Image (tube, helix red, strand yellow):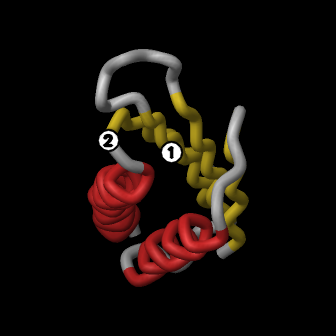
Amino acid sequence: MNVNTQSINFVADVKLKDFIQKRFEKLNLYYDKIIQADIYLKVENTSDKENKIFEAKLSVPGDTFVVKKHSKSFEEGADLVASSLMRRLKKRKEKLRSHS
């Protein structure tokens, strides 16, 4: 799977990009037909502690899943988004199994 990470209005360090890459490659265990993942990292200019926005767009044949989460850190956001996508991929796999 191809994982494209874009950080908007800041520069993401290599450790963060590696963490995201590893976390999203685990999704292949649940659904092996993932084409690519587009990750967008944004920092909101607010005094709120949860000012990190982690958005992921996951492309699979015939569909695209988009999940957006606000969190205190990008690592936490990556975990929240990846687990949400994992549940969606499992549902899609079950749906495809029941139709065939």
Q: CA distance from mark 2 to mark 1?
A: 23 Å
The answer to which of 37 and 42 lies nearer the viewer is: 42
Q: Which residue is mark 1?
A: 65
Q: Which mark, by number, is residue 72?
A: 2
Q: Is residue 99 visible?
A: no
* Pair 2/1: label in front: 2
The answer to which of 64 and 95 lies nearer the viewer is: 64
Contact flag, marks 2 and 1 (Cβ < 8 Å): no
The answer to which of 42 and 10 lies nearer the viewer is: 10
Farthest residue to the top: give it: 46
Looking at the rendered image, the quarter that the C terminus falls into is bottom left
Which amino acid type is shown beneath numbered disc 2? Lys
Looking at the rendered image, the quarter that the N terminus falls into is bottom right
In the displayed structure, does residue 63 sit left or right of residue 2? left
Which amino acid type is shown beneath numbered disc 1? Phe
Count numbered badges in the picture. 2
Q: Residue at x 47, y 35 (%)?
A: 53
Element marked by disc 1: strand
In the displayed structure, does residue 69 sit left or right of residue 15? left
Element marked by disc 2: loop
Residue 7: quarter of image: top right
Farthest residue to the bottom: give it: 29
Q: Residue at x 54, y 47 (%)?
A: 56
Q: Residue at x 40, y 83 (%)?
A: 29
Q: Is residue 68 visible?
A: yes
Residue 9 percent location from the top left of the image = 71, 33
User: Counting other residues with Cα less than 10 Å from the Cα at mark 2, is it few (<14), some (14-19), or many (20 or more)?
Assistant: few
Q: Earlier in the sequence, mark 2 or mark 1?
A: 1
Q: Residue at x 59, y 68 (%)?
A: 34
Residue 13 percent location from the top left of the image = 64, 63
